[in-house]
Amino acid sequence: MSKTVLRFFDDYWIDVRKGVKRTWYTPVLSGTFDRAGIYPSIAWCPEIGKYQLWYEVMPDFSNDGYRHLALAQSDDGLNWSDDKIVIRGGKQGIHGTCVYRDSYETNGSKLYKACTMGEYVHDKARTPFERPLVVYTSPDGVNWEQEKPKMIYPFSSDTYNCITYNPVFKKYMMYMRASNIDRRIAMMESADLNSWNRPMTVIHPGAVYADENEMVQLYAMWAGWFDGMFLGHLWRFHTQANDTASPKMYGYMDTELVYSYNGVNWMHTTGKPIVERPAPPEFGHTQLNFSGMIETKEKDAWILLSSASRGIHGSSNENKRLYDLMEGKIIRLNFYRIRRDGFCGLDGVGRDGLVITKPFELLKDDLTFNINAPFGQVRFAVTDASSKPIEGFSLDDCQPFTGDDLDVVPRWKNRSIHELTGKRVRIWVELSTAVLYSISATMRPYIYGPQVSVSDPTRVETDEGFTDTFSKF
């Protein structure tokens, strides 16, 4: 079992909160790339020691459906090399591409995967033409198999088609549209990239988005796994409620942070954009679409990637008109940074704020805390599962921490966390003018029985080993 990070977007793994408030933080613009890029993807590639950036380019802005995939590289995630085309996609090009560096792949020739819409096909059973979803593979993200890519879905998904691996269920997941222009988020699963289940809706634009003048449709979603939790970038397409056109094509877009413990059941955070759209004429004032987030090579921050447009979402003719009006300066790529696990923190209000977790079993002695307390103090304690003190591990026994550190190791006067390996415990954190962003450890929930993981707490361990809770019935 690998190390798990507890983030506090909700109270799922917290039993007690006292004197703390949940505070949300905003990523900061850290760089730009002056390319008219659409549907970008980013990855840190340790095999070459570089960041790689993929994005779609339109040779002709009057033909929105025809695109190629371009690639740029960077040593620092800020300064990018000149781009080059790596996938052209045949007569119709590509459309809706997500590139994923698959760290779970054992076949080195397929380390990189790209999902996109392929060539038009004739389908008498449904509509005259469809652009099915296809998958390309590559050993390096540069050289892609140029043979006919594998079709994984026979119908169009005219959006950003996000492919990723789900280590909770050991399956690939594809976030897409089940039907062309049906703007809500659907998902398919596959264990082998060959056989896929039928799409199911995982996020629908519900009542929270209802407004008498505005209609919000869910355009696309990027999703990624971050050591115990999936984080998602949900594109919200704001259109006129009284527009009789079908489909609705004109409006602006922003991006909301969403999350999931298993990749299937998704939850909203603040209901606000990850980053507010700037005022005109800044890039992103009409469309600010986030489509990727990675940890820096230094492992101290997250890089977020977005396509930032100055033109509203509209028809191809409107795209071309705005492109000419702005002399080609209509879209660029923006990069943002935020501290690792820094979206949300539990903020001590004054002195002696307290957070107590639910019971966990510590499997290794690698417990650390992401803390910001340069002018305050934090103390740690560990009790048994019923909150009874363990000698030597009380708050008073703790050596207080002051400072700003992503990986604070708790220290007690005469005891070591190593002594609690294999024990069922609760973790206590006392915050005085301090922010707790996350708790990390190799651990598993142990409420009344040892559960498989934080991300999949629906299974427990029996004498026969890990099993589905209800499999014996």
Image (cartoon, rainbow, N blue to C red):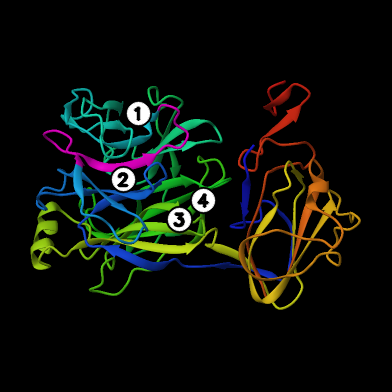
Q: Which residue is mark 2?
A: 160
How packed mark 4 is, by other alpha carbons closer than 10 Å (few <14, some 14-19, many 20 or more), is many
Q: Quick one: label 1 or label 4, which is nearer the N terminus?
A: 1
Query: Do tag 1 and tag 3 residues touch (Cβ < 8 Å)?
Result: no
Sooner in the amino-acid sequence: mark 1 or mark 2: 1
Name the N-terminal-most of marks 4 and 2. 2
Q: Is residue 340 magenta?
A: no
Q: Which element is circle 2 on? A: loop
Residue 223 relative to residue 384: left or right: left
How many circles with numbers are drawn on the protein? Answer: 4
Q: Which residue is mark 1?
A: 109
**In the image, which is nearer the foreground, mark 1 or mark 2?**
1
Compared to residue 298, the image places residue 167 above or below, namely: above
The kind of residue on which mark 2 rests is Tyr
Q: Which residue is mark 3?
A: 296
Residue to which mark 4 is pinned: 259
Front residue of 3 and 459: 3
Q: For the residue carrying disc 3, how many other residues have a C-alpha within 10 Å: few (<14), some (14-19), or many (20+)? A: some
Q: Please state if 176 lies on the left or on the right of 390 as rendered.
A: left
How many other residues sit within 10 Å of disc 2, few (<14), some (14-19) or many (≥20)?
Answer: many
Q: Who is closer to the viewer here, 72 or 471?
A: 72
Q: Does residue 199 appear left or right of residue 88 in this picture?
A: right
CA–CA distance in space, label 4 to label 2: 18 Å
Disc 1 vs disc 2: Cβ atoms closer than 8 Å? Answer: no
Residue positioned most to the right: 391
Q: Residue 271: give x, y in percent of width and height.
A: 47, 61
Residue drawn at the location 77% of the way across and 60% of the way down = 411
Q: Secondary structure at mark 3?
A: loop
Whether 106 is among the magenta residues is yes
Q: Determine the CA span between mark 1 and mark 2.
A: 24 Å
Residue range (magenta):
86-107
Residue type for callout 3: Thr
